[in-house]
Image (cartoon, rainbow, N blue to C red):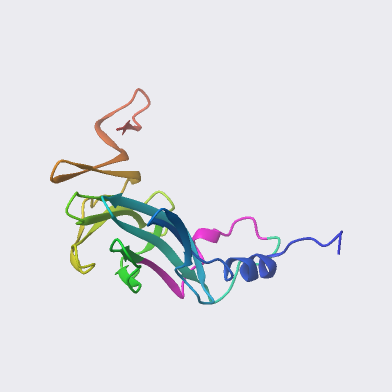
Amino acid sequence: EMDHVVNYDDIGTMLNATEIYGSSYVNNEWKTERLTENTVADMAPTVASSNDRAIVAWRSLSATAMPEDGREDQDITAMFNAKNTINYRIFDGEKWKEASVAYNGSAGTVSAINSAMLTDGTSLLVYSVRTGSDVTTTETFYTVIDTDGEVVTTGRLTNDSYTDTNIQAAAVGDQFVVGWYSEHAAGEKGASDETVVSHD
């Protein structure tokens, strides 16, 4: 209907229909393939490549309930309580390997992902995770994936009560460089005795 107002049920239906596609250029032609096929929200893909290899990672989300209509105080980003993972697939130069899980959601809700790949095909996924109930309590995590597409290690780069967000990754030579925005106490008080916050 032309006058239909979109509600959260409509949004939930649309989100659960989002899928990830990948296009590769092999033997002088483009080939587009569907990389996910499920009934959850697959979104926010990031891709990194080197030579003839690539990695694509994305957020895979589902919720038991959407926010109630008319409730402005609810945070839709925190609603994905049933599934909130990072999945990935590797392109080996000829085909896409099966999807794997890089992060299972155990530490909190993912808010952003970035990626980089070394020349040998080793990949890095970096991601911001909301670890507390406040939207500002975000931490920086990473996962290293080897040339066979297997997870080597996962770690946490920050552990504080302040904002760590907008994470970026790059491959420089045979190393990864990671940077992010941090908002934290500067260790001093302002004129009205409030804590001075540094924006780095």
Residue 18 coordinates in the image, percent (x, y): 56, 66
Q: Residue at x 44, y 73 (%)?
A: 83
Query: Would you say residue 112 is visible in this rendering?
Result: no
Q: Is residue 93 magenta?
A: no
Looking at the picture, does residue 53 appear above or below residue 82?
A: above
Q: Is residue 55 left or right of residue 63?
A: left
Query: Would you say residue 69 is visible in this rendering?
Result: yes
Near-viewer residue (191 or 18)? 18
Near-viewer residue (169 or 179)? 169
Residue 144 coordinates in the image, percent (x, y): 20, 59
Give the quarter of the figure containing the N terminus: bottom right
Q: Outermost residue, top direction?
A: 191
Give the quarter of the figure containing the C terminus: top left
Question: Which span is picked out in magenta?
Answer: 71-87
Q: Is residue 74 magenta?
A: yes
Q: Residue at x 44, y 55 (%)?
A: 29
**Rendering quarter of residue 148:** bottom left
Q: Is residue 130 left or right of residue 78?
A: left
**Rendering quarter of residue 151:** bottom left
Near-viewer residue (36 or 106)? 36
Residue 188 coordinates in the image, percent (x, y): 25, 29
Q: Outermost residue, left direction?
A: 174
